[in-house]
Amino acid sequence: MIELNDVHKSFGKVEVLKGITAKVEKGEVVCIVGPSGSGKSTILRCINGLESYDRGEINVEGLKVDRDAPSIVNIRTQVSMVFQRFNLFPHRTVLENVVEGPLFVKKEPRAQVLERGRALLAQVGLAEKVDAHPPQLSGGQQQRVAIARALAMQPKAILFDEPTSALDPELVGDVLGVMRKLADDGMTMVVVTHEMGFARDVADRVLFIDGGIIVEQGPAKTLLNQPQHPRTQDFLRRVLHPL
Amino acid sequence: MKGFWHDAAEFFPILMNGVALTVIVTIGSLLLSTVLGLIWAMMRVSGIRALSMLSASLINVIRGIPIIVLLFYLYFVMPDLGVTLSALQAAILGLGIAYSAYQAENFRAGIEAIDKGQIEAAQSIGMGWWLTMRRVVLPQAVRIVLPPYGNVMIMMLKDSSQASTITVAELALQGKLIASSTFKNTSVFTLVALMYLTMSIPLILLVRHFEKRAGKK
């Protein structure tokens, strides 16, 4: 459903993606891991056109991703995104955040959307927060609202850009729990993360990215337990045993 | 002092006619400058190079011309080009255009202060440029823009006196006319100053209110 074919991307003189070719099937959970600055987030941002790419091609459900074409709206309403820093709209209530897209972009009937919004917030454990404003919530709660906002679009896939990196450690579990539930329900997910436990337990496949290329990829357990490439081994050793 | 109160009672009704015109000029040019300023600011942040450059040059041209010259141009030169404006129309138009440049820069600063993540979140749920502006950026920018906007209101109230140079009989000109026919300069101009101050005070309080509200978050 998501296909990247030899994708290149430079920021000025720095080439951050040096030919990424990958595929995400429907219902698959793919984790992207790798050191900071390796291009992980850029891959996600190219998939829904927040970032343009210079060469190669990205297709979502057979539709070419081109951030300057009108079709980008079509892609963005099918592929939702969850950001590291939540990016909730602070001037709107939690429920308004969730229903914003379905109401104003997809123009769905109001009553139906509000009902779905409430149900989704209940699903992420925030039924009693519908009328709160985002700044009144903890980071973990905000990220769960952001996930509900993504789900409200009824997307075919969700991209997660380091969803737990900005959270206090004790709040990470709640968010990962919600994500695990989504994966169990068959949602197609691409997750950039440093949570190796989550990748091992939930992901179908893991891509290890370093220096703008996919160094190694494979089934989650195989790659994380028996990495083949020395760079993968080195990275995992440092992430799993920092001392 | 007794003389002042006596003069004040005599001149106040005439000066109130001036106040009415001062209020009309101020409100008229405030509305015009707000609309124009918003248009310039939107062009500036549109991401379309031609529009953004056009807006930037317009703002610089407007900023580089003194208000009084702009007023003279509209009132004395436009008739030569076949466009005749009443003094009041020329005053509102001139002040509105002159202030649109400052409004535009203020609005732009407010829009650009919004976190990029907000715009990305809006885009990621499929919002286009205009919907992002209307639903996400502008509602948040208003909070930032209001305190300086209040200051512009105060400045416009005072600068409406420049309309006197093109014969609009607003407060300052009324004062000048009375003073030159009665020679009671002290009484008249003290009264005029107090009347401007009285109109400014509510606006000053409004700015303080805006600043408090903006500071809360």
Image (cartoon, rainbow, N blue to C red):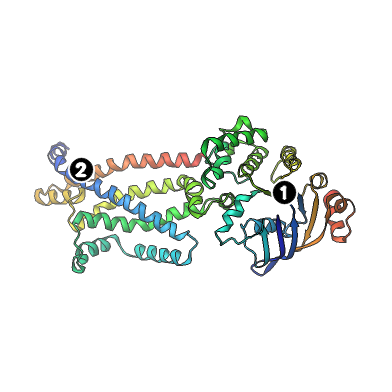
Report the front residue among B133 and B165. B133
Report the front residue among A180 and B165. A180
How far across and down, in percent of the image, does residue A194 sit? Answer: 77, 49
Which residue position holds label 2? B191
Q: For the view shown, which residue lies furthest in the left direction?
A: B181
In the picture, the disc for residue A53 is: none
How far across and down, in percent of the image, does residue B210 sit? Answer: 43, 41
Which residue position holds label 1? A189
B120 is higher (above) or lower (below) than B204: below
Residue at x 19% of width, y 68% of height: B80
Chain for numbered disc 1: A
Chain for numbered disc 2: B
Q: Quadrant of residue A186?
A: top right
How far across and down, in percent of the image, does residue B202 sit? Answer: 33, 39
| Badge 1 element | strand
Q: Is residue A5 left or right of residue B196?
A: right
Q: Amino acid at mark 2?
A: Leu
**Residues at marks 1 and 2, CA–CA distance in whole angstroms:** 73 Å
Q: Residues within 10 Å of mark 2 (few under 14, many from 20)?
A: many
Q: For the view shown, which residue lies furthest in the top direction?
A: A128
Residue at x 44% of width, y 42% of height: B211
Q: Is residue B182 left or right of residue A81?
A: left
Front position among marks 1 and 2: 1
Report the front residue among A77 and A36. A77
Q: Amino acid at mark 1?
A: Met
| Badge 2 element | helix
